Image (tube, grey):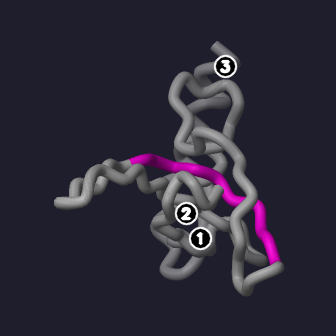
Amino acid sequence: MSSWWGASVLGLGGWFIKKMPFVGYIYTASKQISAAISPDQTTHAFKEVVLLRHPHIGEYAFGCITSTAILRRSAGEEELCCVYIPSNHFYIGDIFLVHSNDL
């Protein structure tokens, strides 16, 4: 009974926060990011952590691989990785599409 009551109160609180004009966007984005990196999820949005040359030559940043893709050209196939690099606010960051050899 108490777990049902607590889940109901938390669900109502989440619904109320989502309806607030500016706070709802921040709440939804931060909840999605925390769900993506939570270790107790069965699926993970981030596959592994990599070191990427960013923003200049000689400077590096940590990033997370979110997905991979195969680029088919007449010269052959190349594997590209989609890398997310977080900035000051974790839900805001840069996404780069880089060759797997550059990681």
Q: Which mark is residue 29?
A: 2
- Considering every residue shown, the one lying at the far left of the view is 74
Could you tell me which residue is drawn at 74 percent across and 83 percent down?
57
Find the magenta span and give its range: 59-68
Image spot of residue 85 (x, y percent): 66, 66
Kind of residue at disc 2: Ala
55 vs 13, left or right, is: right
Kind of residue at disc 1: Ile
- Whether 81 is among the magenta residues is no
Image spot of residue 41 (x, y percent): 59, 27
- Mark 3 or mark 2: which comes first in sequence? 3
- Considering every residue shown, the one lying at the far front of the view is 75
Residue at numbered disc 1: 26
Q: How many marks?
A: 3
Kind of residue at disc 3: Ser
Could you tell me which residue is drawn at 48 percent across and 54 percent down?
81
What is the C-alpha distance between the residues marked 2 and 1? Answer: 5 Å
Task: Say if mark 2 contacts mark 1, CB within 8 Å.
Answer: yes
Could you tell me which residue is drawn at 69 percent across and 18 percent down?
2
Residue at numbered disc 3: 3
98 vs 23, left or right, is: left
Q: Quadrant of residue 8?
A: top right
What is the C-alpha distance between the residues marked 1 and 3? Answer: 27 Å
Above or below: residue 18 compared with residue 31: below
Could you tell me which residue is drawn at 71 percent across and 71 percent down?
53
What is the C-alpha distance between the residues marked 3 and 2? Answer: 26 Å
Query: At numbered mark 1, what does the secondary structure look like: helix, strand or loop?
Result: helix
Q: Residues within 10 Å of mark 3 (few under 14, many from 20)?
A: few
